[in-house]
Amino acid sequence: MIVRFPPSPTGNLHIGGARTALFNYLFAKKHGGKIYLRLEDTDRERSKPEFERNILDGLAWLDLAADTLPDGKELWRQSERADVYRTHLKKLVASGAAYLSQEKERERREVVRFKNPGSLITFHDIIRGPITFDTKELGDFVIAKSIEEPLYHLAVVIDDAALGITHVIRGEDHISNTPRQILLQRALGFAEPLYAHIPLILAPDRSKLSKRHGAVAVTEYREQGYLPEALVNYLALLGWNPGTDREIFSLDELAEQFDLKRVQRGGAIFNAEKLNWINKEWLRTLPPDVSERAVRSALATETPRIKEDVLARALPTILERIGKWGDVRALAEAGELDYLRAAPKVDPAHLPWKGEPIESTREHLAEAAGRLERVAGAFSKDAITLALMPYAEEKGKGNVLWPVRFALSGREKSPDPFTLAYILGKEETLRRLAAASNLLS
């Protein structure tokens, strides 16, 4: 089985295109087939090198590698196959299946039109079942601007035949293109591939997904800090399901499970929250050193730098707060990680807990510091909890734990005081508690 992914370099690789590439890739790998890549750049005015680079970059990031083409090339560009198209165009004209037509629009020009027999065409869509078109409605459609300039439909048909494509898996917006392409296949004596038209990706309001709903280009998701494994995982579940409740799959596992018969017909709703959840699950699978490097990279422009030992201890807490690496920057910009870099500027008015006298609060801070100073051995979260909790239960948890937490973080919302003390380390914890106690003197 042979499939293809044929993006047009008139724009960046977007989510819909990436999912089409993924479904073709999974189908090929599931059946031990091949997937070929070609760039449909017959629109010379809109096709740009930067878009081609973006497409190739996005596919590489998602690890959707195409197979080497029969001629040994990595990909085909339709702009480089003009001679092939010209040969077939001439054959169509010579056989009477197409003809030169003088058009009168802005300026007189000669195009090539396909002589439409006006027949009924029925093809079996693997996802949607039989689909019938009355091709009379298409008229004699244009297949080339000239003998030298083929248009989309003709180039696609010729290339699919040359590559031996057995299955065309593409978006449902291409359904209306299919009868034209079948007419051309028959006129050229080519075998007809099987078709599978996958549902479009829709926004939550069921409108077409666009920039106003968030990122659309694949590279934007990379810049926001999503993992490629997570985006592939999520895209696979947009319009397809494995028939079980399982939701986390590697690329290889998806290839094992994938079946076109389990692709839905209706539009697939893009859900950013679900994508974030899947990405978070993938973040949990990363080794600590990989996560630490990623977090530190996200904070590279922030000063002063967080000490390595502090960041290592804070890592689980940070990971719990984020859905993607870009969220680390958001936390930093909101000041929520400032306490990791330096002692906070503590407002003494916020240290007492709900009506607790200042003198009592100062005593609680001093007692907490004394108990933590006496912790022997590892300054672990369990050891810290064991040292503070009995006193907190005796004097009131809020009365003791609130001022400790605020003294260490300077924030009303922060991790619990046991976690904070563990992250900061014994020496820094004692220093901050003493500073806060002095503010109340």
Image: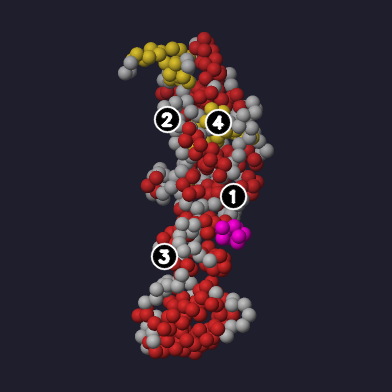
Q: Main secondary structure of the magenta part?
A: helix
Please tell me which residue lies in front, 398 or 274. 398
| Residue bearing mark 2 | 46
Outermost residue on the top side: it is: 94
Image mark for residue 242? 1
How far apart marks 3 and 4 lie (CA) works out to: 47 Å
Residue 385 place in picture, x, y as percent: 55, 80
How far apart marks 2 and 1 lie (CA) works out to: 38 Å
Secondary structure found at label 2: loop
Q: Which residues are magenta?
A: 283-293
| Residue bearing mark 4 | 38
Q: Which numbered disc flags the more N-terminal residue, 2 or 3?
A: 2
| Residue bearing mark 3 | 335
Quadrant of the frame with the C terminus: bottom left
In the image, taking residue 30 as reference, residue 85 lies left or right, namely: left
Residue type of the residue flagged with mark 3: Gly
The image quadrant that residue 125 belongs to is: top right
Which of pointers 2 and 3 indicates the residue nearer the eye? 3
Q: Which numbered disc flags the more N-terminal residue, 4 or 2?
A: 4
Residue type of the residue flagged with mark 4: Arg
Secondary structure found at label 4: strand
Is label 1 in contact with label 4 (beta carbons under 8 Å)?
Answer: no
Residue type of the residue flagged with mark 2: Arg
